[in-house]
């Protein structure tokens, strides 16, 4: 397999992942209900990582978010984990399924766009290299 072919395959795959996730997030914003919630707790979960010294485990914290949907209070686990616990009382913008408010997407716009945009950008670079526009 030639370098050009590898660049084409990588470019198409990475671009599809990036643009697909952008379209998915846009669809959620259009079709799900928006709410503002507050962090009422943290769910601590173990995560494995491979380091030069071997495998290690560390804790990842996911927010427990309370919000109002249709006059009823709901609690759901947020989808963006991090190494430090979330601050209790921290405000969170989120989207939830109208038919199932416990299914949420806590909109951490910066992280989501960094992920999606990164894949789309790297995919575009691979496609540009495959076309010979950059070397």
Image (cartoon, rainbow, N blue to C red):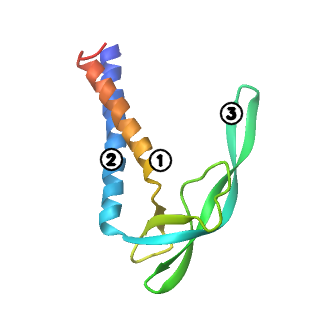
Q: Residue at x 62, y 58 (%)?
A: 62
Mark nearer the viewer, 1 or 2? 1
Q: Which residue is mark 1?
A: 111
- Check residue 121 in the rendering and tell me which mark sits there, or answer none: none
Mark nearer the viewer, 3 or 1? 1
Residue 2: tell me if it is visible.
Answer: no
Image side of residue 64 versus residue 128, left or right: right
As helix, strand or loop, the secondary structure at mark 2 comes to helix
- Closer to us: 39 or 7: 39
**x, y (%) of residue 97?**
41, 71
As helix, strand or loop, the secondary structure at mark 1 comes to helix
- Closer to us: 55 or 30: 30
Q: Quadrant of residue 9?
A: top left
Q: Are marks 1 and 2 in contact (CB under 8 Å)?
A: no
Q: Quadrant of residue 51?
A: top right
In this picture, is 114 found above or below 74?
A: above
Marks 3 and 1, Cα distance to the nearest angstrom? Answer: 23 Å
In this picture, is 16 found above or below 97?
A: above
Q: Quadrant of residue 73?
A: bottom right
Q: Residue at x 32, y 36 (%)?
A: 15
As helix, strand or loop, the secondary structure at mark 3 comes to strand
**x, y (%) of residue 26?**
31, 56
- Viewport quadrant of the N terminus: top left
Q: Which residue is mark 2?
A: 20
Q: Which residue is mark 3?
A: 50
| Disc with the residue nearer the chain's start (1 vs 2) | 2
Q: Are marks 2 and 3 in contact (CB under 8 Å)?
A: no
Residue 82: tell me if it is visible.
Answer: yes
| Disc with the residue nearer the chain's start (3 vs 1) | 3
Marks 1 and 2, Cα distance to the nearest angstrom? Answer: 16 Å
Label 3 Cα neighbours within 10 Å, binned few <14 / some 14-19 / many ≥20 = few
């Amino acid at each position: 397999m030639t370098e050009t072919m590898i660049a084409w395959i990588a470019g198409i795959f990475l671009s599809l992942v990036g643009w697909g996730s952008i379209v998915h997030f846009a669809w959620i914003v259009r079709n799900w209900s928006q709410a503002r919630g507050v962090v009422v707790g943290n769910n601590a979960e173990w995560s494995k990582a491979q380091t030069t010294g071997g495998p290690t485990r560390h804790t990842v914290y996911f927010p427990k978010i309370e919000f109002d949907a249709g006059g009823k209070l709901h609690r759901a686990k947020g989808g963006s984990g991090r190494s430090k616990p979330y601050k209790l009382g921290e405000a969170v913008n989120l989207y939830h399924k109208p038919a199932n408010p416990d299914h949420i997407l806590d909109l951490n716009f910066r992280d989501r766009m960094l992920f999606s945009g990164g894949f789309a950008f790297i995919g575009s670079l691979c496609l540009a290299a495959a076309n010979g526009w950059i070397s």
